[in-house]
Amino acid sequence: MTVLRFDEHCLHRTRHVLRVAARHRGLRGERLDDFLIAINECVVNAVEHGGGQGRLTLWRADGVLLCEVRDRGPGIPAPALADAPLPPPGAPGGRGIWLMRRLTDEAVFTTGPTGTAVRLGMRLPRQDPDDPAAARGTFGGVTGDVRR
């Protein structure tokens, strides 16, 4: 399990740690890129709208790579969570949640006046037991504060 605390000053480092951790857990190629874009949107939303900082947890369960981002903001307004079409070019905002839903296999939003938790999931490819990388196991747990 990887657990990171983040704020606006460490977004680049947060993305780097996530890329390495997700790769070591078996996500590759375009699906890795999509997952990282969705997580980035989530983290940026937490910084911009959720109190300026948050906590990210990444883990693997039942063939799915999961990421949960939590903040202590005022919650997401219901209209923002509506499954609306992509906003037109030039419209302010509204793309982050849309991207999270389209780029991942699962996007679950739990929100209220004391904060928001967003869980994003991507199914992992089946591992070949003869692949030396699969035999090494999963990436060791990382817990830290990337805000330093």
Image (cartoon, grey):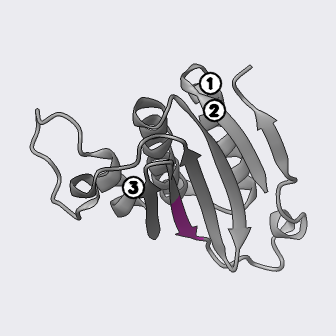
Q: Nearer the viewer, residue 86 or 72?
A: 72
Helix, strand or loop under label 1 = helix
- Dot in front, 2 or 1: 2
Task: Give amino acid for label 2.
Answer: Phe
Badge 3 or badge 1: first in the primary sequence:
1
Q: Which residue is identified by label 2?
A: 6
The image quadrant where one finds the C terminus is: top right
Mark 3–mark 1 distance (CA, rounded to whole Å): 21 Å
Q: Residue at x 89, y 70 (%)?
A: 135
Do the residues under discs 2 and 1 have CB atoms within 8 angstroms? Answer: yes
Mark 2–mark 3 distance (CA, rounded to whole Å): 19 Å
Residues drawn in magenta: 119-123
Q: Residue at x 63, y 65 (%)?
A: 65
Badge 2 or badge 3: first in the primary sequence:
2
Task: Give amino acid for label 1.
Answer: Cys
Task: Give amino acid for label 3.
Answer: Met
Q: Is residue 131 above or below residue 119?
A: below
Q: Is residue 99 magenta?
A: no
Label ID, residue 100:
3
Q: Which residue is identified by label 1?
A: 10
